[in-house]
Every structure is written in C-alpha cells, then in structure tokens.
Image (cartoon, rainbow, N blue to C red):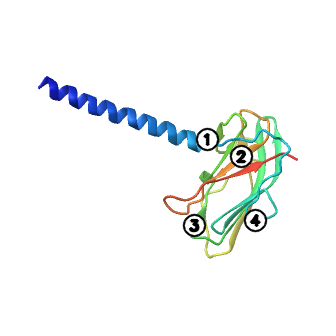
Amino acid sequence: MARRLLVGAGVLGGLFAAAVVAYAAFIALKSPVVPSSPNAASVTENCSPGPCANVQGYVLWVSNVQLANDVVHMTVKFQNSSSSTHASPEDLQLIDASRRASTPITDSTGCNTWTRHEFAKSGDTFGPVNICFRVTNATPPYILRWSPDEGAFCCETDIRIDLS
C-alpha cells in the first residue's frame, strides 16, 4: 500500500514538474526579442506604408505614433481579405523595452477603444481608430503584438514601432 502511494506521488510530481517546464518554455517563446538599435527601420511584410503587418490577407496599418509621458498613442486601421471575421481590441498588445505587455487603455485623453467589429465581406476596412497603451519603459522601440483570429493555431505577428 505504501509503495503504491509513493509511486502515485512520484508520477503526480513528475507530471507537475513537466507542466511547469512546458509553461515556462511557452512564456519564453511568447516574449519578443526587442531589437536594441533605436534607428532601425520598421519592418513591413507585404504591405505599405509601414509600419504594418499582413497576416494571410488581413492587414493592420499603424500611424501617428506618439509618446506622452508613459502613454503611447497610435492610430490603427484594418483591411480584411482573409478568413478572419472581426477586428477586436483584445487582439492587440504593446510590448515595451522592458518586455512588459499592455492592452489598450481608455483612461487618458484621446485614448479610445472599440467593440468587436464584424467584417461584412472580403476587402472591408475598419478604422482609423486612435488607441493608447500605457508603458512601464518609455524607451522605444516598441513591439505591437497582433493576434488576429485566423484559426486555432494561427497567427501572431509583431510589428516594430519606432518613434520618428
């Protein structure tokens, strides 16, 4: 009886340790490597003008990026020609130089948000929308992480944001 309890406890301990290691690896993979060169150009991928991102025909453009104290203001616009059905503020996070992520805020002047926007047909656009993020480290560059709803195992992309 005691042997069964020890074996059971060992198995549960091993499963718990494996889960902790898997979770730590997942978090490490999700953390972006923020380039240290502040003068590097913003990367665009199959879209322009940048900074922007194109995820399977779903395009996000970023413009008018400004920093006021600890709040980053920007304008975003979407055009959808993909299988995604909507644009949502929950799909965006801003990651600062300290690798801390923040979601859109509305408690500062000029900072808006929107409710989930459903696209009626392919090629529809949404925006421009002025959004803001509070950062803990105001030193650029920033990473705008976009996770559009393109299916269970797709997609997350990072857009490098420099202040001009």
What residue is pinned by disc 3? 84
Q: Is 90 positioned to the left or the right of 40 in the image? A: left
User: Which mark sits nearer the N-terminus, 3 or 4?
Assistant: 4
Establish if 128 lies above or below 94: below
Q: Residues within 10 Å of mark 4 (few under 14, many from 20)?
A: some
Q: Is 53 positioned to the left or the right of 8 in the image? A: right
Secondary structure, mark 2, is strand
The residue nearer to you, when weighing 9 against 91, is 9
Q: Nearer the viewer, mark 2 or mark 3?
A: 2
Amino acid at circle 4: Cys
Amino acid at circle 3: Ser
Question: In which quadrant is the N terminus drawn?
Answer: top left
User: CA separation, marks 2 and 4?
Assistant: 17 Å
What residue is pinned by disc 1? 31
| Rendering quarter of residue 45 | bottom right
Q: Residue at x 50, y 58 (%)?
A: 153
User: CA separation, marks 4 and 1?
Assistant: 24 Å
Q: Nearer the viewer, mark 1 or mark 2?
A: 1
The residue nearer to you, when weighing 105 against 37, is 37
What residue is pinned by disc 4? 47
User: Which mark sits nearer the N-terminus, 2 or 3?
Assistant: 3
Image location (x, y in percent) of residue 59: 69, 64
Q: Residue at x 27, y 33 (%)?
A: 11
What residue is pinned by disc 2? 143
User: Which mark sits nearer the N-terminus, 1 or 2?
Assistant: 1
User: Which mark sits nearer the N-terminus, 3 or 1?
Assistant: 1
Q: Residues within 10 Å of mark 1 (few under 14, many from 20)?
A: few
Image location (x, y in percent) of residue 23: 47, 39
User: Which mark sits nearer the N-terminus, 2 or 4?
Assistant: 4
Amino acid at circle 2: Ile
Secondary structure, mark 1, is loop
